[in-house]
Amino acid sequence: MKKILTILAALGVAGSFAFPAFADPQTDLKEFQGYFKKKYPTVKFDEFSNGLYALPEYAAQREQWIAAMDFPAYELGLTKGTALWNKKFPNGESFANCVKKGAIKPAYTYPRWDKATKSLRVAEMDIMDCAKANNADPKALTFLTADLNKDTKARVQLAEVTAHFYSLYRGKRVKPDVDFNDKDVLAAYENGKKHWWSRRGQLNFACAHCHLDLAGKDLGNQPLSAGLGHTTAWPAQRYSWARIETIMKRYETCNSQVRDKPDKHYSPTYLNLQLYETYMSSGLPLTAPAMRN
């Protein structure tokens, strides 16, 4: 921790960070995307969907990444997810039928607001509910009954199925299905925004420190991506993990890295954070599943 704090102090961010003033989501979006467009004038907008590989500071890593995409490491997990997606439930229904019937919405519309329950939904939640509604075998789909914070095998299985689902919409532009005229939706957005910009943990560090202030720099030999485009690649496979994972797992590890207690997967806190991050990436193309550092 002392080494990290020393690095932060040297970079001038340890004690200078401030939460942004209140603004409506549309203004937030314009300013957030505008910041990165100004910081990286040579980077095409769509490239921000490629994470740190879009940034000129990581040109060498980009070359390696492009070469690796000929045979991406996530293909094995994606193949498993495709097989589960195509397998019929005991009643003859399938995940694909849930999409046709509207129980699973288009991937680019998540997170979405469910008016009936007055809550946010992400793709994994609708995928799980589809399986449960069709009496899927929990022994085959272990993610239906597992503790996703603790059961890596079950969580990865869910990530692999979701990765196949997102692959069907690759290139489609992000547009969360939310209406900010609804006060409950706006409250969820503001909560996610607050989380992204607020300090937490023993390191007293916010998401914005790494992915706005330090974007394009290395922290403890860890290259840092821009906040713009964060959610477009997930589910994703990190080289250090060697498996496809959910964005909820990424949130959990980020919290742990700043010495903060992680929340539960699909908790309101993480759902709100995913809404804020995804809305900030509105208009970018989906690239999931993808490889990430």
Image (cartoon, rainbow, N blue to C red):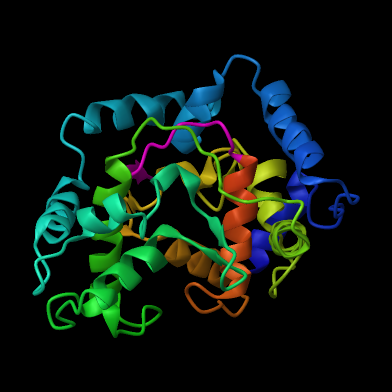
Report if residue 234 lies within the magenta region: no
1 w.r.t. 25: above or below: below
Query: Quarter of the image holding residue 98?
Result: bottom left
168 w.r.t. 14: above or below: above
Question: Where in the figure is residue 220, as x and y percent of width and height?
Answer: 55, 53
213 w.r.t. 2: above or below: above
Question: Where in the figure is residue 15, as x and y percent of width and height?
Answer: 85, 57
Say which of 271 and 99 sits in front: 99
Residue under the image location 34 percent in, 24 percent down: 63
Say which of 209 and 191 sits in front: 191
Report if residue 291 lies within the magenta region: yes
Residue under the image location 70 percent in, 75 percent down: 202
Considering every residue shown, the one lying at the far top of the view is 42
Query: Quarter of the image holding residue 120?
Result: bottom right
Q: In this view, does 16 lie to the left or right of 10?
A: right
Say which of 102 and 254 sits in front: 102
Q: Is residue 225 left or right of residue 154?
A: right
- Mainly helix, strand or loop, the magenta region? loop
Residue 243, can we see it?
no
Residue under the image location 25 percent in, 71 percent down: 131
Question: Where in the figure is residue 1, as x and y percent of width and height?
Answer: 63, 69
242 w.r.t. 129: above or below: above
Say which of 260 and 223 sits in front: 260
Boundaries of the magenta span: 281-293
Q: In this view, does 278 lie to the left or right of 138?
A: right
Q: Tell me how many marks there are.
A: 0
Question: Where in the figure is residue 208, as x and y percent of width and height?
Answer: 70, 51
Q: Is residue 55 left or right of residue 5?
A: left
